[in-house]
Image (spheres, rainbow, N blue to C red):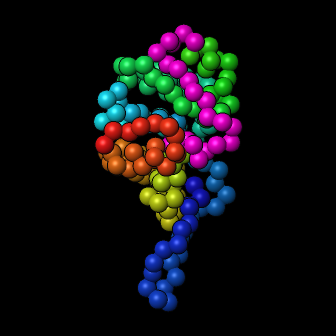
Amino acid sequence: MLPTVRRTWAPRGQTPILRHRTRSHKKVSAIGALSISPARRRMGLYLHWHPDQNITTTEVIGFLRDLLGHLRSPVILIWDRLNAHRSRRVQDWRARHQRLMIEWLPPYAPDLNPVEYLWSHVKYHRMANHGFCELDDVYAQARRQTQTVATTQSLLRSFVRAAKLPIRLGS
């Protein structure tokens, strides 16, 4: 609920004031994936939102189930080492789904994770300098902003390129 404050413009002598609630520990958690089509011509963004919750193994398995339902070809998931990703339940579930292969990112390497660039873009650019008073407002704005990003192919590609992974993107 705390706003991300960024430098901004204002008329001389009129300092912008950002009002917000303090001491709120509410949050909106999300789990997401960027996909590249087999022909590498189109990218997709898949998200599950969890207002005022943490991401646990239950949410990870639900996300993976839905992801495999949307993507028909084999899926190679490039994953960070979040505890929920490495849990025994998730690994057992993954073992029963041969279409899903996992490649692990090195520990503490958010700069190699394209989805981290997505979160950064939404949080520090699209939602910066907004003081939200209600969790529903944060949730609605986050959904709106990520939907806008999801329709911008060049932006989705930029997240993959910024990660400098050895993935070749089509034009």
Residue 160 located left or right of residue 90: left
Q: Is residue 129 magenta?
A: no
Q: Nearer the viewer, residue 113 or 151?
A: 113
Q: Seen from this angle, which residue lies furthest bottom?
A: 13
Q: Nearer the viewer, residue 68 or 76?
A: 76
Task: Residue at 49%, 25% (x, y): give it.
Answer: 76
Q: Quadrant of the C terminus?
A: top left
Please, is residue 105 above or below residue 8 in the view? above
Residue 86 spot, x, y in % from top left = 66, 25
Residue 139 located left or right of residue 89: left
Q: Seen from this angle, which residue lies furthest top?
A: 96
Residue 128 located left or right of residue 91: left
Decide if residue 121 is in sight here.
Answer: yes
Task: Residue at 46%, 15% (x, y): give it.
Answer: 99
Please, is residue 148 above or below residue 128 in the view? above
Task: Residue at 41%, 33% (x, y): give it.
Answer: 35
Residue 64 spot, x, y in % from top left = 50, 24
**Total label count?**
0
Residue 114 spot, x, y in % from top left = 50, 43
Q: Is residue 104 magenta?
A: yes
Q: Nearer the viewer, residue 38 or 93?
A: 38
Which span of residues is magenta-colored? 95-115
Residue 156 spot, x, y in % from top left = 39, 45
Task: Residue at 59%, 61% (x, y): give it.
Answer: 21
Decide if residue 134 is in sight here.
Answer: no
